[in-house]
Amino acid sequence: MTTLNAANAGTYAFDDTFKINRLGYGTMQLTGPGTWGPYKDPEAGIKVIKKALDYGINFFDTADSYGPWFADRYLAAGLKGAANRDQIFISDKVGQTRQGPNIWTPHGEPNYLRQQVEVSMMTLGLDHEDLVFLHRIDTHFSVADQVGELKKLQDEGKIKHIGLSQVTVEQIKAAQKVAKIDAVENLYNVADHRDDDVLAYAESQHMAFLPWFPLATGQLAEAGSPLTTMAQKYEVSPAQIALAWLLKRSKAILPIPGTSSVDHLADNVAAANVVLSDADFNELSQLSSK
Ligand SMILES: NC(=O)c1ccc[n+]([C@@H]2O[C@H](COP(=O)([O-])OP(=O)(O)OC[C@H]3O[C@@H](n4cnc5c(N)ncnc54)[C@H](OP(=O)(O)O)[C@@H]3O)[C@@H](O)[C@H]2O)c1
C-alpha cells in the first residue's frame, strides 16, 4: 500500500545538518479574507498544522505579514510539543507591512527588518530562524542595506540561511555581492513559467526554489482546471498533477501548497506518490503561456 507521507517526494539538503522533505506547507491560508485578520476557526487551523506533521511535512513557509501575525501564532501552536521539533525547518519572510485586506507595502528599512526577525522568533518560539526571505526588495533602500542587515543577523547567529522573494536574476546577483543567497521564492506553477530563468539560475547556484501559488491560488485544483484530463488519466486530483509536475520539474523546487482543509492537505501530500511520464510532463509543460 502506498503511504501518505511527504518523504515520498524525496529530500532537499539546506546544509550538512538539515535535510527536509521536498513537499512542504505554506501558512498563508490560515488567515481571514485578503490574508487579513484571524482565521475563522483557529482550532481548525492549528489542526491542519498538526496533521501536516502526521503526514511527514517538516518544512513550513510563513511570514509575520500573514494576518499579520495570526498564521505564525497558529504555526507555533501546531508545532508545540512536536516529537521531531529539531528536524522541522521554517522559512520566514520580512520586509512587508500590512494596512488592511489585500494591502501589502514593502518596507525594507534595516531596523524594521531586524525587528521583524526578533519578534517572529518570539512568536514562533525560536532561538534562531532557519531561513529568512526578503519578501520584496524595497526600492527606497539599497540592496546592500536590506540584505546587509540580514547578513548581520546571520553573523549574529539569528538567521541560518538568507533568501529573496519575487526577484529577477539581476537582483539575485546584486544580493550575492552582499551575502550568500540560499533560496528564492517566486511565483511559479505548471501554468506560469515566467520565471524559468530565475529557476535555472537558482539551480546553477545550488539554491532552493520555492514556487509560490503552486496551485495558482486553487485555480489549478478546482472544477474546470486545465489539468482535469491528465488527472483522470492518472486517477488522481488536478492538485496532485500540479504538484507532481513541480516535483519533477527540478530537484531544487520545494512546493509549499497552502490549505485550510485537512482533506486538501491529504490530497496534496498524496502528490508525492504521483510519477508523471516524461511525455505527460512535456505535454503539461505546454500549458504555460509565457
Ligand atoms: N513569497 C511570496 O510573495 C508569496 C506569495 C504568495 C504565497 N506565498 C506562499 O506560498 C504558499 C502557497 O500559496 P497560496 O496558499 O497562496 O496558493 P496555492 O497554494 O496556489 O493555492 C491555495 C488555494 O488552493 C486551495 N487548495 C489547496 N489544496 C487544494 C486541493 N488539494 N484541492 C482543491 N483546492 C486546494 C486552497 O483552498 P483550501 O484552503 O480550501 O484548501 C487555497 O484556496 C502560501 O501559503 C505562502 O506560504 C508566498
Image (cartoon, rainbow, N blue to C red):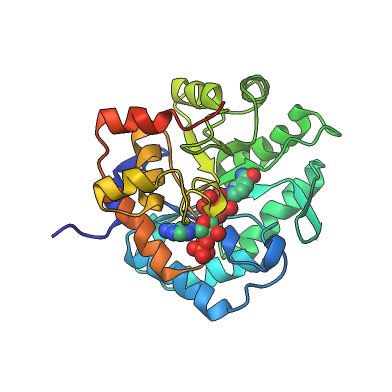
In the image, residue 201 lies at what x, y percent? Answer: 51, 21
Q: Is residue 238 visible?
A: yes
Q: Is residue 56 left or right of residue 260?
A: left
Report which quarter residue 284 is drawn in.
Answer: top left
Counting the numbered discs, the total is 0
- Is residue 94 or residue 41 the one in the foreground? 41
- Is residue 70 or residue 275 the one in the foreground? 275
Spot the residue most to the right. 140
Q: Residue at x 67, y 52 (%)?
A: 117
User: For the C terminus, which image quadrant?
Assistant: top right
Spot the residue most to the left. 1
- Is residue 26 or residue 268 the one in the foreground? 268
Q: Residue at x 77, y 61 (%)?
A: 101
Q: Is residue 80 visible?
A: no
State whether residue 125 is above or below residue 206.
below
Q: Is residue 103 left or right of residue 162?
A: right
Report which quarter residue 147 is drawn in.
Answer: top right
- Is residue 24 or residue 241 the one in the foreground? 241
Report which quarter residue 10 is drawn in.
Answer: top left
In the image, residue 273 lies at what x, y percent? Answer: 25, 49
State whether residue 236 is above or below residue 32.
above
User: For the N terminus, which image quadrant?
Assistant: bottom left
The quadrant where ligand 1 appears is bottom right
In the image, residue 88 lies at what x, y percent? Answer: 42, 56
State whether residue 220 is above or below residue 245.
below
Q: Residue at x 72, y 64 (%)?
A: 36
In the image, residue 114 lies at what x, y percent? Answer: 73, 48
Q: Residue at x 71, y 33 (%)?
A: 148
